[in-house]
């Protein structure tokens, strides 16, 4: 069993808890609170579209405060585990539900974390700074512009010229959501990384659907002027 890599040492994080144990704990919460949403998603016809499961953090804080705290402290690790738990719950209903023959697994089903508890560390009235990277925050501001919804390539596949294996590279939000060109082959070869520097992007054939695309929209907000100290400038 793999142990979750925990970056911050909070009293709420238990280093010996395995990823599978967190996944099971999230699955229990999902079945108690999000059963209808997950069933609706299973009954839906379209298996390619993306579905959202709303996670109300105030409710989660009441029923399992440890899970709520680890999600807030380390969302980059634990939101993906929560997404895996949604798949586990789907799998459970697909095996046990009386109407399971009308259901299909939806792999693009994501947790949408909402309603953060109202405590000062989590709520901002000014635009967050670099110290807030990787944290879940609630920001109130005035939406002044919404961009059009665009398609964003979230992953690209490369084939190594040496070991011939295919590996994928994720897009990087800090590089304007482009997929950075890899420096070395990342495919493991007999247990060790191949590290070859020769590879080609796997190009799509005519008629192929790109597999890893996301909808993407930019929303500009302005800090609320009435919440700012007198004399300070409101930022976009
Ligand atoms: Zn290689």
Image: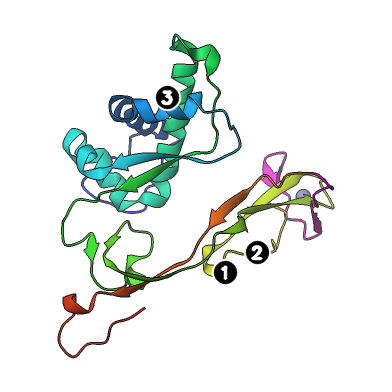
Q: Which residue is mark 1?
A: 175
Q: How is the image coloured?
A: rainbow
Label whose residue precedes the other's in the sequence (2 or 3): 3
Judge left or right: residue 21 versus residue 90: left
Q: Residue 231 at x, y = what percent?
A: 18, 91
Identify the element where label 1 is drawn: helix
Q: Residue 204 at x, y = what percent?
A: 80, 49
Judge left or right: residue 163 versus residue 216: right
Q: CA distance from mark 2 to mark 3?
A: 38 Å
The 10 Å Cα crowd at callout 3, few under 14, some 14 to 19, many 20 or more, is: some
Magenta span: chief secondary structure: loop
Q: Which residue is mark 3?
A: 39
Residue at the extreme bottom:
231
Q: CA distance from mark 1 to mark 3?
A: 37 Å
Q: Residue 114 at x, y = what percent?
A: 30, 48
Residue at the extreme top:
98
Any mark on residue 180, and which?
2
Identify the element where label 3 is drawn: helix
Q: CA distance from mark 2 to mark 1?
A: 8 Å
Residue 134 occupies which quadrant of the picture? Answer: bottom left
Q: In this orientation, which residue lies closer to the viewer: 191 or 210?
A: 210
The 10 Å Cα crowd at callout 2, few under 14, some 14 to 19, many 20 or more, is: few
Identify the element where label 2 is drawn: loop
Q: Is mark 2 within 8 Å of ligand 1?
A: no
**Span colored in magenta:** 187-207
């Amino acid at each position: 069993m793999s142990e979750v890599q925990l970056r911050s040492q909070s009293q709420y994080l238990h280093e010996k808890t395995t990823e599978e144990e967190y996944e099971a704990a999230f699955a229990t919460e999902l079945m108690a609170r999000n059963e209808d949403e997950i069933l609706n998603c299973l009954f839906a016809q379209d298996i390619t579209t993306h579905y959202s499961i709303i996670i109300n953090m105030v409710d989660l804080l009441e029923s399992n405060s440890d899970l709520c705290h680890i999600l807030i402290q380390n969302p980059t690790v634990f939101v993906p585990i929560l997404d895996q738990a949604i798949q586990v719950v789907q799998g459970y209903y697909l095996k046990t539900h009386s109407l399971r023959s009308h259901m299909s697994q939806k792999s693009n089903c994501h947790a949408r974390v909402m309603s953060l508890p109202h405590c000062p560390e989590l709520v901002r009235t000014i635009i967050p700074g670099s110290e807030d990277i990787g944290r879940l925050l609630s920001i109130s501001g005035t939406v002044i512009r919404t961009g059009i919804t665009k398609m964003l390539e979230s992953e690209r596949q490369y084939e190594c010229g040496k070991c011939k294996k295919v590996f994928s590279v994720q897009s990087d939000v800090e590089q304007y959501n482009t997929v950075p060109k890899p420096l070395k082959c990342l495919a493991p070869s007999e247990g060790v990384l191949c590290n070859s520097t020769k590879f080609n992007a796997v190009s799509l054939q005519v008629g192929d659907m790109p597999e890893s695309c996301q909808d993407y929209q930019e929303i500009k907000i302005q800090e609320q002027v009435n919440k700012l100290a007198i004399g300070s400038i409101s930022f976009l």
